[in-house]
Each structure stands twice: as C-alpha cells, then as structure tokens.
Image (cartoon, rainbow, N blue to C red):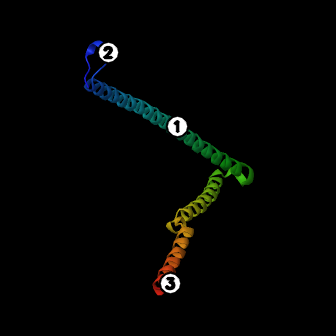
Amino acid sequence: MATDGNNGSRGFAALFRDLTENGVALVRGELRLARMEIGDVVAGIGRGTGLVAAGAVLLLLGAFSFIAGLVLLVGDQWLPADRYWLAALIVMVVAGGLAFVLAKRGLALISPSHLAPRETVATLKEDEEWLKQQLTSSATSR
C-alpha cells in the first residue's frame, strides 16, 4: 500500500502515526481545557463560599444588634428604674424559648422516621402482595 513520496501520497504507517500523534494532542488539549474549567469552577465555589460566610457574619452581627436594641428598649421603656439587667434576662428567656421551639421542630423534620419514603414503602408492599397473588394464581392454574 505504500506509495512513493514523489506524488504526495503517504503510506499507511505515516497516516497512522499522524493520527496517533494528533489524537494524543487532542486528548491533552481536552484535559488542559477540563483542568482550566474545573479550576474556574473551584475558584467560583471558593468566592461564593466566602461571600455566604461574610453575609452570615453580618446577619449574626445584625441579630446581636437587634437583641441589644430590644434589651435597651425593654429596660428603658417598660421596666421601672432602668433595670437593663432584668430586660436582658427577659429577652434571653424569650429568645431561648424561641430557639428551643425552632430546634425541636427542626429535629423533628430531620428525624429518620420523618425522612423515610412512606409512599414508596407502601407501594412496594402493594407490589409484593400483587406479585404473591400472581405467583399463587399461576401455580394453581397449572
């Protein structure tokens, strides 16, 4: 199949070598592109995580400021003789009670019994019963 080099045709071995070299170069290029894209994705995840963390810290500081303002309001407006310690105690008890209720509800939502796929389990039991009926009816019909 080899032809002579004068007419511009190439032999099978030369074509196969070029195909192999170009295929390897293509795979290397694709891997390089994938590495760059994954790097961009990881960098984006890092930036996003940093922004979420900064937002969470600012939200927490805002919540602390709100609670401090609430203590000052209760101590100044509703309690006699500016008893801020009592206002702080009242706000702490209310916030603790609210935190307890929220935590209890959250734990109930993520309990294993609540996470079980009830409808799927019921459907699987129905399918099991149907299959048993099919097997017994086919065995008795023979």
Q: Earlier in the sequence, mark 2 or mark 3?
A: 2
Q: Earlier in the sequence, mark 1 or mark 3?
A: 1
User: Badge 1 local density, few (<14 within 10 Å), some, or many (20+)?
Assistant: few
Q: Which mark is residue 137?
A: 3
Q: In front of the other: label 1 or label 2?
A: 2
Q: Give whichever of 86, 16 is nearer the camera.
A: 16
Instruction: Give the spatial CA distance, label 2 vs label 3.
Output: 77 Å
The outermost residue toward the top is 6
The spot of residue 75 in percent (x, y) is 69, 51
At 27% from the left and 26% from the top, the residue drawn is 12
The outermost residue toward the bottom is 140
Q: Which element carries disc 2, helix, strand or loop?
A: loop
The spot of residue 72 in percent (x, y) is 67, 47
Contact? badges 1 and 3 (CB < 8 Å): no
Instruction: Give the spatial CA distance, label 1 vs label 3.
Output: 60 Å
Location of residue 63 with respect to 130 vertically, above or below: above
Q: Earlier in the sequence, mark 1 or mark 2?
A: 2
Tally the numbered discs.
3
- Location of the N terminus (image quadrant): top left
At 63% from the left and 46% from the top, the residue drawn is 68
* Kind of residue at disc 1: Gly
Q: Give whichever of 56, 138 is nearer the camera.
A: 138
When asked about the image quadrant of residue 20, the answer is top left
Q: Which element carries disc 3, helix, strand or loop?
A: helix
* Kind of residue at disc 2: Gly
Q: Which mark is residue 48?
A: 1
The spot of residue 109 in percent (x, y) is 56, 63
* Kind of residue at disc 3: Ser
Q: Give whichever of 22, 29 is nearer the camera.
A: 22
Q: In front of the other: label 2 or label 3?
A: 2
